[in-house]
Image (cartoon, helix red, strand yellow):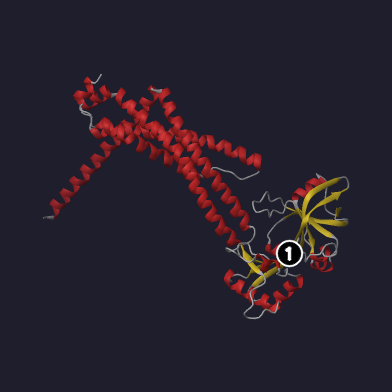
Amino acid sequence: MPADKKNSSKGKFLSRLFSEQIIFVQVFRESVLFAVQSLRTNKLRSFLSLLGVAIGIFAIISVFTAVDSMENNIRDSIKSLGQNVVYIQKWPWSFGNNYPWWKYMNRPLPGYKEMEELDKRTHTVKSMAYVAYINAKLVKYKNNSAENVAIVAISENYMDIRKFELEKGRYFSEEEFASGKPFVVIGANIATALFADAEPLGESIDVMGNKLQVLGVVTKEGKSIVDNSMDDVIMVPVNNARNVVNLRSDRIDPFIMAEAKPLVTLAQMKEDLKQGMRAIRKLRPKEEDDFALNESTLLSNGISAMFSTMGIGGWIIGGFSILVGGFGIANIMFVSVKERTSIIGIQKSLGAKSYFILLQFLAEAVILCLIGGMAGLLLVFPLSLLATNMMEFNLLLSQSNVIFGLSISAVIGIISGLIPAWVASRMNPVDAIRAN
């Protein structure tokens, strides 16, 4: 075929395709306008229809917003434990089936001297710290007091591993750690409870019968799901705390934190720590480890499984609500088709194509569901803000959930309106006009 004929055929094809696209857009626009006019004419029926969808979307998006927010909060809290940090402890964070608990009971607790020796033996560790949480105590300053205060005995490099900022004051010096001087760094809530608007730096507080001078105040972090916020704790050097309590007690359960060097994987550091601890405790090759190497991924994996189950539960709860709303829309659309049968007949007798009628009723169902979906989302948004303010829990409606809710609404509209729209489009114009 000559080139000019090929170009001519191609031009006609593109012209016809463009014309069809313009016609489709015009038909779709007119269908939407017809649908909107129908919704305006039958306001009460439209309201009752979108109410069911709104409740369904509200139910499913509320569940997913709560689940997503809870998961994000927990994951953020776990991140504060350190993504490249290993915890050397007596007890593991996860157990297998039928584990011999008595073996764990008989394990020795990690010691401060073990940390110092381990730091010398390992080559993959950037920083290492010894930490001991002392049971909640009452802390006083003059006539003010703070209850359930966690006292954390720490070694020098703790701040390098457990990242936090100081709102005012400073951290302990190397000499203060070594000598165990009676100094303390306090959390934001403790500072508020004891000093209100007064200046805490340089003041002495009563901790377990000892006077400790305040060196610094930690910047407020907010509540933590895994309960590792610094807001309600006070930090003291290990060499000061050991003068008051026995840090090698099972009730305190001390542990060693180790942070990996750059480009060193957790697996490499864990193997290095394992060999070091076994050498320090003089374990024979066939003897089992008498210590646990824990990391945040153990919690993350468990959380992923838990929230997958919760997500399935959310689909079940929201699915029933959406199902009820979908049946409501389908029922209303069948009623709408029946009421407008003669109008459909007139439209078809004037030349309206079947797909125009189909799009008209389908658009009505989709618009109805989208309005209901938006109403449901508008209910979720203020309730999430209210819950966030009341519970101090970051419960926010995410953009992905908004898009998800509107997408579900559109899909429900298509599914619910497809059969009524198809019935309307297949009507015989003469029979339709005579129907009423």
Query: Along the line of sight, which residue is nearer the eye, 218 or 97?
Result: 97
Please provide percent x and percent y for residue 417: 34, 34
Query: Along the line of sight, which residue is nearer the eye, 238 or 133?
Result: 133
Q: Residue at x 44, y 27 (%)?
A: 48
Q: Residue furthest left?
A: 1
Residue 33 position (above or below residue 301): above
Q: Residue at x 57, y 36 (%)?
A: 382
Please provide percent x and percent y for residue 167: 74, 53
Report helix, strand or loop for mark 1.
Answer: loop
Q: Residue at x 69, y 51 (%)?
A: 221
- Left or right of 85 in this view: 312: left
Please provide percent x and percent y for residue 336: 33, 26
Quadrant of the rendered image containing residue 320: top left
Camera sees residue 429: yes
- Left or right of 156 in this view: 278: left
Could you tell me the amino acid type at mark 1? Answer: Pro
Residue 428 position (above or below residue 384): above
Please provide percent x and percent y for residue 64: 51, 44
Camera sees residue 403: no
Label total for image:
1
Name the image quarter holding the N terminus: bottom left
Say which residue label 1 marks: 254
Query: Along the line of sight, which residue is nearer the eye, 107 or 309?
Result: 107
Decide: few, some or many residues near mark 1? Use Cα within 10 Å; few <14, some 14-19, many ≥20: many
Residue 275 position (above or below residue 372): below
Q: Residue furthest bottom?
A: 285
- Left or right of 238 in this view: 291: left
